[in-house]
Amino acid sequence: MSLDPLSADHHPLHTGIQQFNQGDYYACHDTLEAIWMTAPIAEKPFFQGILQLAVALYHLGNHNWRGTAILLGEGISRLAPFEPHYYNVNVTDLLDCASPWLEAAQQLGAEQVTLLAEALSQSQLGQPATAAAHTLPRWQIHYVDETNQTTD
């Protein structure tokens, strides 16, 4: 599925992705929830998956390890069937980003959630994100163009 190129910038999904990429995870949740609620049944897991990743990161910012770990896992599971891309979103790239964060959350546990939250802050500033021995990718949702090349 792809967005109409003429309306992509005005599509609420584009707004939600901008909010996600800017680290405004709560606003992203609100934007994507509105899309998810009215989406066709087959598309709901796609929107819900991105929404759950956003909420996981919101929880991480609040040092809520349990919410972070659960929602990262659920978001990854919901998005996996939409690989490699859907609605011009590079789903594979997003999952490649999310998986190391989930692994780090699981390995560090609730006792070290502060390290993971600090890594999220580093990531949002465009700095290399590290938590203990984990080097983590920067959170950003990328698009693919008509030739399936990743774009920002």
Image (spheres, rainbow, N blue to C red):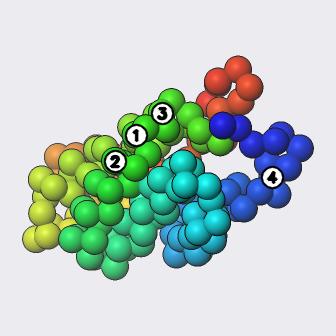
Q: Secondary structure at mark 2?
A: helix
Alpha-carbon neighbours of circle 3 within 10 Å: few (<14), some, or many (≥20)?
A: some
The image's mark for residue 9 is 4
What's the residue type where badge 1 is placed? Ala
Q: Earlier in the sequence, mark 4 or mark 2?
A: 4
> Does 3 sit left or right of 21 as displayed?
right
Alpha-carbon neighbours of circle 1 within 10 Å: few (<14), some, or many (≥20)?
A: some
The image's mark for residue 83 is 3
Q: Secondary structure at mark 3?
A: loop
Alpha-carbon neighbours of circle 2 within 10 Å: few (<14), some, or many (≥20)?
A: some
Q: Which residue is mark 1?
A: 80
What's the residue type where badge 4 is placed? Asp
- In the image, residue 107 lies at what x, y percent? 12, 53
- Residues at marks 1 and 3 touching, judged by CB atoms closer than 8 Å: yes
Residue at screen point 12% across, 63% down: 109
What's the residue type where badge 2 is placed? Ser
- In the image, residue 149 lies at what x, y percent? 64, 24
